[in-house]
Image (cartoon, rainbow, N blue to C red):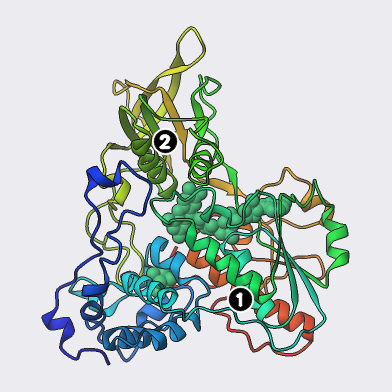
Amino acid sequence: MADPKGFLSTPRVGAPTRPIEERRQDWSEVYVPGGLLPIISEQAGRCMDCGIPFCHNGCPLGNLIPEWNDYAYRGDWTAASERLHATNNFPEFTGRLCPAPCESACVLGINQPAVTIKNVEVTIIDKAWDNGDVTPQPPERLSGKTVAVIGSGPAGLAAAQQLTRAGHTVAVYERADRIGGLLRYGIPEFKMEKRHINRRIEQMRAEGTKFRTGVQIGTDLDAAKLAKRYDAVVIAAGATQWRDLPVEGRELAGVHQAMEYLPLSNKVQEGDFVAPPITAEGKHVVVIGGGDTGADCVGTAHRQGALSVTQLEIMPRPSDERPAHQPWPTMPMVYKVTSAHEEGGERVYAVNTVRFTGDENGRVRELHLIEVVFEGGTFVAQEGTERIIPAELVTLAMGFTGTDQGNGMIEQLGLELDARGNIARDGAYATNVEGVFVAGDAGRGQSLIVWAIAEGRSAAKEVDTYLMGLPSALHAPIRPTDRPLTV
Ligand SMILES: Cc1cc2nc3c(=O)[nH]c(=O)nc-3n(C[C@H](O)[C@H](O)[C@H](O)COP(=O)(O)OP(=O)(O)OC[C@H]3O[C@@H](n4cnc5c(N)ncnc54)[C@H](O)[C@@H]3O)c2cc1C
Ligand code: SF4
């Protein structure tokens, strides 16, 4: 156990962030570089090493949290990194981006602020990279089997790394020009700098994983032919089919999907453009949708120099405290203030968009909204509450409806979909097509990075078993049907 009295004597302290005025001027991560190091061992010492660590179950990866808290408390960063990597291929992604359902399940959280598990995680992995503890782990021998992974987001990368390390020859196919999925083109630099992806890719290349970018399976390469060339295929193509807003004025210039807007900003940071082709500079910006994607638009718009940013959400404002029907140790829906929200903007709840109006050049100028109440399973507009707000750039961040069905991959392989538009799979991540498996958002719908990594690991175990005809020694945290304590 870490510090036996730590939970009594040490208050929770979060990660120190840079001043808002400073970070709105740049794209670097919002945290003070190295700011956690002086405080983190003491914070890890708050862990009670509970007899039943509910945090294990709260984390979809089953991370061995009390074990690495103990090592972090003692300053044994190498041992901490070894225990962390036992269940998580990419702790630098989750340690920065995970909403930490483990902390909602922390036993200390019943009557005190939970242990800062996510911050311990990110400190361990950052130290491990600094200390040279993260090295390539190529397989000792090759199996002679080949696997194609379609999609290079966290699910595809986790599956590819596990299968490469198990001795299979793995090629990752990615339609974008760079590897990383939504980690690369979606999540902004200020939440996670892309250098973290780049050095993992280097590690994976050194282990033997091959990467093919700019190849869309279905259009550039026939999916059925690809499946014939490989002994197994893992589809990790994400759930990038966006939800639209079919209201009057949707066609006006300046109304964009969030995922048309955000990747262009990522591309500026990569050095592809000097200025983003769609920019918030000097504009009144409205973001429709109150989730992670919307928050990323808010932070991006502020950095681009927006005049104002308003974020609209159809649901009512969540409560500050855990609601009674979402008791510990579940992950509750509570009011969240992300780093992007700290930086400014207005959040408006329980409103729906009625229409957009534009100027004589066909550019959006205003958004007409109305207050709504959720009654009898539907949103009911409240007469007399319509109002108009300025809107010169609108981003739609209203969620995703399933995996992309427009590139021919599904038909070429003859894949079945489930009722929610995801690729159907059984309890072993297998689709209806022999030798074709599915992991991450493509199978479960738009979710979280931690789930994508967990599914990539678990699918890899099933693929390894399928290829070798023997029970696999790979670690697998979850099955597709598992719904432990989290979203
Ligand atoms: C803007 C935004 C912000 C988010 N922020 C967070 C966050 O802070 N924390 C969090 O936990 N989650 C967040 N999420 C959700 C998280 O990013 C996803 O759940 C996660 O990336 C899913 O991983 P994946 O590997 O299944 O798919 P993806 O990351 O979507 O990767 C799929 C990849 O497959 C490629 N692909 C698709 N079809 C083909 C094809 N036919 N041929 C070749 N390649 C193909 C795509 O180009 C893509 O690169 C966010 C999502 C968005 C949109
Ligand atoms: S991956 Fe997420 S849920 Fe798991 S320990 Fe890290 S922060 Fe917690």
Q: Which class describes the residues within 10 Å of circle 2: few (<14), some (14-19), or many (20+)? A: many
The quarter of the picture showing ligand 1: bottom right
Count of numbered marks: 2
Q: Is mark 2 within 8 Å of ligand 1?
A: no
Is residue 312 shown left or right of residue 193?
left
Is residue 410 shown left or right of residue 404?
right
Residue at screen point 19% across, 68% down: 13
Front residue of 390 and 328: 390
Residue 150, given in percent of the width and then of the height, sits at 71, 60
Which circle's residue, 1 or 2, is located before the other in the chain?
Answer: 2
Front residue of 464 and 164: 164
Residue at screen point 32% across, 70% down: 119
Amino acid marked by disc 2: Ile
Amino acid marked by disc 1: Ser
On residue 1, which mark appears? none
Q: Which class describes the residues within 10 Å of circle 1: few (<14), some (14-19), or many (20+)? A: many
Residue 317, given in percent of the width and then of the height, sits at 28, 45
Q: Which residue is mark 2?
A: 288
Residue 76, given in percent of the width and then of the height, sits at 34, 88
Q: Which residue is mark 1?
A: 458
